[in-house]
Image (tube, helix red, strand yellow):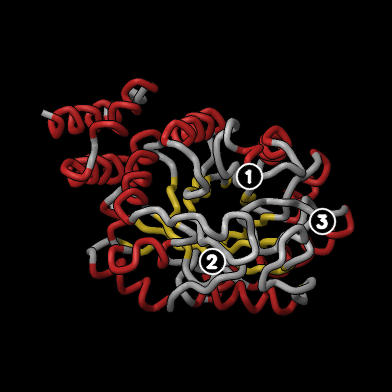
Amino acid sequence: MIADRISSLADQVIAGIPLDREQAEWLVSHADDACLLDLFRGATRVREHFLGRRVRCCSIVASKVGRCSEDCAFCSQSAHHQTHVAGLTVLTSQQVIEAAREASANGADSFGIVNSGLGPTDAEVEQWGAVVEQIRRQTPVRVCASLGVLSEAQARRLAEFGVQRYNHNLQTSRRHFPRIISTHSYDDRLATLRHVQSAGISVCSGALFGMGESWADRLDLAFELRDLNPDVVPLNFLIAIEGTPLAETEPLQTMECLKIVSLYRFLLPGKEIRIAGGRETHLRDLQSWIFLAGADSFLIGNYLTTCGRAADADRQMVRDLGLELVEPPVPRRVAQQA
């Protein structure tokens, strides 16, 4: 029976034996609508074995928005597209610090500074690095950055400033990537991630689904990520934005999104799998099912150029499932005063 085979594959993963490509393809082809609950059950077992019942939250701030030189087909910030994002907006250091405080108050244990553009200048590395130092002094959140392509020296400098995690998504498979982005290469992204790892910064890298990729592309990316070995794997689902080349793309079905989550849990069993952009749009009333499908982390608050839902509703969702929301740690200076 299909249910028995899915359960057996979950047992294999729990025993520490990774799935191979043939087994992953079997899951894709056999875990159809009639067996999705069996797939979710297996993914939940894997999640609870490796990560328990803990759920983590992350929040981001779009600190530099618009006028991006890159032509990413999904992005409203690209200067190549005519979208609702007009001109360039850059937040002040104080605005970013306030956003970090708000993220911590909302229950996020990680906070990301996200900039548009191919990558930062050395001056921008210094500018945002100084902001990171301030956030680390004033809040308990883990500070992350997503500034684009980095040189080896820039990655080392960010580490010196105290950046604890760096996000740079591969987005899709190597095969599908040129259909989505032409102004930089897949290898540019991989090189940045290797620079970040060499600098001792935790890596966050994942995907954007719903851009016309195949299941083979989704598997290719999962195995690429397994080789890369990031700590966090964010999964996004395309929000088709007017004015972008993907504006007329048909949205993924809810159960297909959840199947992707489960597949990635089977293939990346011990990783923090974070559900990010497109959660509200694609999952609607089934947002809580991300945890049943195997996720253990999600983004709260707003996204880069689209809105999320209220943080208190998300926290309640976690509590209603009987899961444990990981709270931001108490800053050391506060603990010493207690």
Residue 247 in the image: state x and y as whole percent: 56, 60
Classify mark 2: helix, strand or loop. strand
Classify mark 3: helix, strand or loop. helix
Q: Residues within 10 Å of mark 3 (few under 14, many from 20)?
A: some
Q: Quadrant of the N terminus?
A: top left
Q: Nearer the viewer, residue 31 or 96?
A: 31
User: Which residue matches tag 1?
Assistant: 180
User: Which residue matches tag 3?
Assistant: 125
Between disc 2 and disc 3, whose residue precedes? 2
User: Which residue matches tag 2?
Assistant: 59
Instruction: Determine the residue positioned at 66% across, 37% down.
Output: 178
Residue 209 in the image: state x and y as whole percent: 48, 48
Figure disc tally: 3
Between disc 1 and disc 3, whose residue precedes? 3
Give above or below for 91 relative to 25.
below
Q: Residues within 10 Å of mark 1 (few under 14, many from 20)?
A: some
Instruction: Determine the residue positioned at 89% across, 58% down.
Output: 123
Under mark 3, the amino acid is Val
Give above or below for 14 relative to 134.
above
Under mark 2, the amino acid is Ser
Classify mark 1: helix, strand or loop. helix
Give above or below for 22 relative to 100.
above
Between disc 1 and disc 2, whose residue precedes? 2
Cα–Cα span, label 1 and label 3: 27 Å
* 167 left or right of 134 in image: left
Q: Is residue 79 visible?
A: yes
Instruction: Determine the residue positioned at 79% across, 64% down.
Output: 67
Under mark 1, the amino acid is Ile
